[in-house]
Image: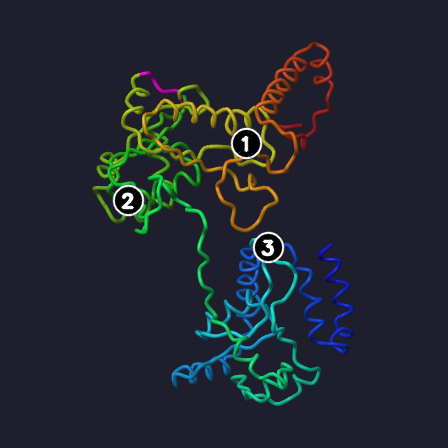
Amino acid sequence: MRRGTMAALAVARPFLYVANRVFATRVLHTVLRGESRDRLDLLGEEFFEYFLKPRLKAAGVLKLEELKAQSAKIVLVSQGLDHIMRPLANHLGVEYLLSNRLDFRDGLATGRLLEPVIRPRGILAKLKKQTPDGKISREQLLRDLGFVKNPGVLQGAIHPARRASAKLKVPVVDFSGHRTDGPFSVRQSLRGKHILLIGSTGFIGKVWLANLLTEASDIRRISLLIRGSRAATSLARLQRMVEESPVFEKLAERHGQNFASFLQERVEVLDGDVTLPGLGFTPEVRRGFAKSLDLIVNSSGLTDFNPDLRDALTMNVRATSYVLDFLRDCDHASLLHLSTSYVVGRRNGRVFEQLSKDYNPAGVRGFRAREEWSRLEALIRETETRGSLPRCWRRFSKWPRTKNTSRNS
């Protein structure tokens, strides 16, 4: 609907501009209703990087630098939205903007422009001779913007190019139960702590481990849950990962010949399986963790778009449940769980980590997570039972086999 409306407005734009440039500007921005401020900021940054920045005129930028050297007050004037003009102003080092701004409610655009509306220049504006730096007199600017009858509006419409950081009404991090005014330090919080990292052989897990070893050297101990196999033990998998992954190259260069001993002092490899109850640990290991563990970081899981249903339930549902059960047995450990990006659903912008029972990304009413889990497990059992019947095997044996037949066919 938004794209269709934009296409229709593209056809009607010349007629709207001829009738009333301010009204036309208002109408064109109504299609942004419902977009979040964060999303518009990101789109504005991308538009600047890929469209505006390559088209900057060197002569104009040079003139602008000369004016900045003279400590001149520079205002960037444009009919564009501040979401686009802020990245441009920050790139040029301009402190003030005169641009259009959208009205927001609860972080979402209403589709209305705030007063005053910065209308576009006239049809013949591009044919007029301009200086390379785009300098324009105050009188001419008042005429271009239609503020001649009320020149005081001009000064009030100028706003800083850097937007003030919004103050959150709720704390993002609150470990102690009460808000503090002091800064939050990740290094200080992890100092002397015992961390269990699950999924360390995955992409995010490797980066997490490398950052911990590089930036948080005061951690007491890092335990890695790695599943061994017949082909390689858990320790062998870690060694191969460190040798082959580029994220550990800088760490290896820093420690040189002492890199192996550094890893042995900081990292403990445990043979386990997140898809098993108790994470596959022995009772002795579980009792030790219950007393000493401070933080569990779970970055395991399947990220395939179309995995086998059995594998998806095992890794993304059942394994997560086992991690939660393991957490409940610990005396004081916390959990940091990394999920896929698609659990956010159709929401955009800033999303607070507020727990919602039986939440689902599609927003299906009456959804019950436990019931859905049980139905999927029953579907797997039913499918496996039907697949083992003799008549199914006879049908499978008659299935045409070609060179292009995939494994999942």
For the C terminus, the image quarter is top right
| Contact, mark 2 vs mark 3 (Cβ under 8 Å) | no
Q: Residue at x 29, y 17 (%)?
A: 284
Q: Distance between the residues labelled 2 and 3?
A: 38 Å
Q: Element at badge 1?
A: loop
**Percent position (x, y) of residue 35?**
61, 55
The kind of residue on which mark 3 rests is: Leu
The kind of residue on which mark 2 rests is: Ala
* Nearest to N terminus: mark 2 or mark 3: 3
Q: Which mark is residue 108?
A: 3
Picture mark count: 3
Give the residues drawn in magenta, as a range: 279-283
* Nearest to N terminus: mark 1 or mark 3: 3
Residue at label 1?
Answer: 357
Check the image and report above or below for 314 versus 185.
above
**Percent position (x, y) of residue 148?**
62, 86
Q: How far apart are marks 1 and 2 (CA)?
A: 35 Å
* Nearest to N terminus: mark 1 or mark 2: 2
Task: Quadrant for residue 95, please give it.
Answer: bottom left
Q: Residue at x 58, y 89 (%)?
A: 139
Disc 2 versus disc 3: nearer the observer: 3
Check the image and report above or below for 294 versus 79.
above
Q: Residue furthest top?
A: 390
Check the image and report above or below for 22 versus 34.
below
Q: How crowded is mark 3: few (under 14 residues within 10 Å), some or many (20 or more)?
A: many
Q: How far apart are marks 1 and 3 (CA)?
A: 25 Å
Along the horizontal axis of the image, is 291 left or right of 54? left
Q: Residue at x 47, y 25 (%)?
A: 321
**Percent position (x, y) of residue 167?**
44, 55
Residue at label 2?
Answer: 216
| Contact, mark 1 vs mark 2 (Cβ under 8 Å) | no
